[in-house]
C-alpha cells in the first residue's frame, strides 16, 4: 500500500508543480503582450502627432503667405482707389473746360462762330480760322477721351483687386478654421499619447514585479478592491482605457459622446474618492456596483473590440475631462431619481 500511496503523492506533486509552472509562465507572457501592445499604440500616436505637427507648420506657413498677400492687395486697392478718384476728377475737369471753351467760342459777345468765319479777310484767313477751331475741338475731345479711358482702366483694376481680395479673405478664413481644427486634434492626440505613456510605464513596472504563483491576478485584484469573480477572460489583458471604454459601452454605448463621458467621469470620481478603491480596475469590479463587470458583458465587449467613440470618451475622462462635477453614481433616467440627466442616465 505504501508504494502506491507514494506514487499517488508523487503524481500529485508533479501535477501541482506543473500547474505552478504554467501559472508562472502565463502571467509574464500576458504582461509582455500588454507592454508590447501599449508600445505599438504609443509609437503610432507619436508618429501621428509628428505628422500633425508637420501639417500645422505647413499650414502656418500658408497662412503667413496669405496674410502677406491680403496686406499687399489691400494696399494696392487703396492706391488704385486714389488713382481712380484723381482720374475721375481730371475727366470731369476736362469736360467742364471743354464746355466753357465751346461756350466762349460760340457765344463770345455778339459774334457767332459763323460771323467770325465770315469776317475773314481772305480765303486763306477763313481756312486758317476754321482749322484753328477744328484743332481746339479735336484737342479737347482727345484729352477727354484719354481721361475717360484712364478712368475706365483704373475702375477695371479696382474691380479685379476687390475680387482678388475677396478670394484671399475667403481662403484665409478657411485656413483659420483648418488651423483651429488641427490644433484641437493635436491637443487630443497629445492627451491620448500621455495617457498611453502612463499606461505603458505602469505596465512595465507591473511586468517586473514578482508574481505569487498560488494567487491568480484576478484574485489579487479582488482582495485589494473588493471585487467579485467577474474579472476574468479578456479583462485580464485590457488596459485601463480599454476596460473603462468597455464599461462605458455597456452602460452608455447607445448614447452620445456626453453620455459616454459622464459614465467615465463617475468612474474617475470614484477612483479619487476615499470611499472607493483607488484603481480603475478596483472601481469597475467593486462588488455590487457595475452589473456588466460581473455578468461577463464587459469581457464580451473586450473580445470583439470596443467602439472607437467609447475609447475616446474613456481617454478623455482619464485625462481629466469631466461633465458631471462630483457625482459618484448614476441610474437610468426612467428611474425617477433626482439629479442631472445626460444621455439617458441620471447622475447624482
Image (cartoon, rainbow, N blue to C red):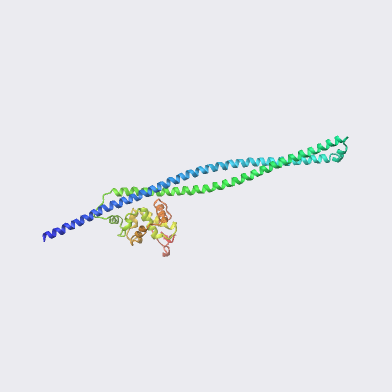
Q: Residue at x 39, y 60 (%)?
A: 251
Q: Count the marks: how many?
A: 0
Q: Is residue 112 left or right of residue 245?
A: right
**Measuring 64% from the left and 44% from the top, which residue is drawn there?**
158
Asked whether 290 or 78 is in front, the reply is 78
**Residue 290 seen in the figure:** no
Which of these two is toward me, 183 or 58? 58
Q: Measured along the vertical axis of the image, is residue 85 above or below residue 272?
A: above
- Find the residue positioned furthest to the front: 123
Quarter holding the N terminus is bottom left
Residue under the point 49% across and 48% down: 180
Which quadrant does the C terminus fall into? bottom left
Q: Quadrant of residue 98?
A: top right
Image location (x, y in percent) of residue 153: 67, 42
Using residue 317 as the reference point, say whether residue 8 is left or right of it.
left
Residue 124 locus on image (x, y percent): 85, 35
Q: Position of residue 225 (x, y in %)?
A: 31, 56
State left or right for residue 4 relative to residue 245. left
- State the residue in front, 229 or 124: 124
Q: Position of residue 252 (x, y in %)?
A: 41, 60
The image quadrant that residue 219 belongs to is: bottom left
> Can residue 185 be seen in the rendering of this structure?
yes
Amino acid at each position: 500500500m505504501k508504494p502506491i500511496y507514494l506514487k499517488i503523492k508523487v503524481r500529485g506533486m508533479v501535477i501541482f508543480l506543473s500547474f505552478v509552472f504554467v501559472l508562472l509562465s502565463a502571467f509574464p507572457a500576458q504582461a509582455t503582450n500588454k507592454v508590447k501592445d501599449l508600445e505599438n499604440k504609443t509609437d503610432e500616436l507619436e508618429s501621428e502627432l509628428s505628422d500633425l505637427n508637420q501639417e500645422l507648420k505647413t499650414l502656418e506657413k500658408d497662412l503667413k503667405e496669405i496674410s502677406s498677400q491680403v496686406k499687399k492687395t489691400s494696399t494696392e486697392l487703396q492706391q488704385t482707389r486714389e488713382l481712380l478718384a484723381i482720374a475721375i476728377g481730371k475727366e470731369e475737369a476736362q469736360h467742364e473746360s471743354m464746355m466753357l471753351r465751346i461756350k466762349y467760342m460760340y457765344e463770345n459777345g455778339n459774334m457767332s462762330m459763323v460771323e467770325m468765319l465770315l469776317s475773314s479777310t481772305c480765303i486763306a484767313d477763313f481756312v486758317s480760322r476754321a482749322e484753328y477751331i477744328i484743332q481746339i475741338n479735336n484737342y479737347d475731345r482727345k484729352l477727354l477721351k484719354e481721361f475717360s479711358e484712364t478712368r475706365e482702366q483704373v475702375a477695371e483694376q479696382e474691380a479685379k483687386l476687390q475680387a482678388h481680395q475677396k478670394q484671399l479673405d475667403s481662403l484665409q478664413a478657411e485656413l483659420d478654421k483648418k488651423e483651429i481644427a488641427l490644433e484641437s486634434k493635436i491637443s487630443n492626440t497629445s492627451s491620448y499619447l500621455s495617457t498611453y505613456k502612463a499606461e505603458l510605464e505602469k505596465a512595465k513596472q507591473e511586468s517586473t514585479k514578482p508574481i505569487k504563483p498560488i494567487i491568480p491576478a484576478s484574485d489579487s485584484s479582488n482582495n485589494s478592491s473588493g471585487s467579485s469573480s467577474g474579472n476574468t477572460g479578456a479583462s485580464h489583458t485590457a488596459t485601463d482605457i480599454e476596460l473603462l471604454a468597455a464599461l462605458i459601452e455597456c452602460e452608455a454605448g447607445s448614447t452620445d459622446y456626453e453620455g459616454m463621458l459622464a459614465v467615465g467621469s463617475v468612474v474617475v470620481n470614484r477612483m479619487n474618492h476615499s470611499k472607493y478603491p483607488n484603481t480603475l480596475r478596483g472601481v469597475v469590479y467593486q462588488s455590487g456596483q457595475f452589473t456588466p463587470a460581473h455578468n461577463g458583458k464587459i469581457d464580451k465587449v473586450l473580445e470583439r473590440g470596443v467602439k472607437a467613440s467609447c475609447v475616446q470618451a474613456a481617454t478623455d475622462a482619464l485625462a481629466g475631462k469631466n461633465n458631471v462635477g462630483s457625482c459618484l453614481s448614476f441610474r437610468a433616467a426612467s428611474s425617477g431619481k433626482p439629479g442631472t440627466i445626460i444621455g439617458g442616465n441620471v447622475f447624482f
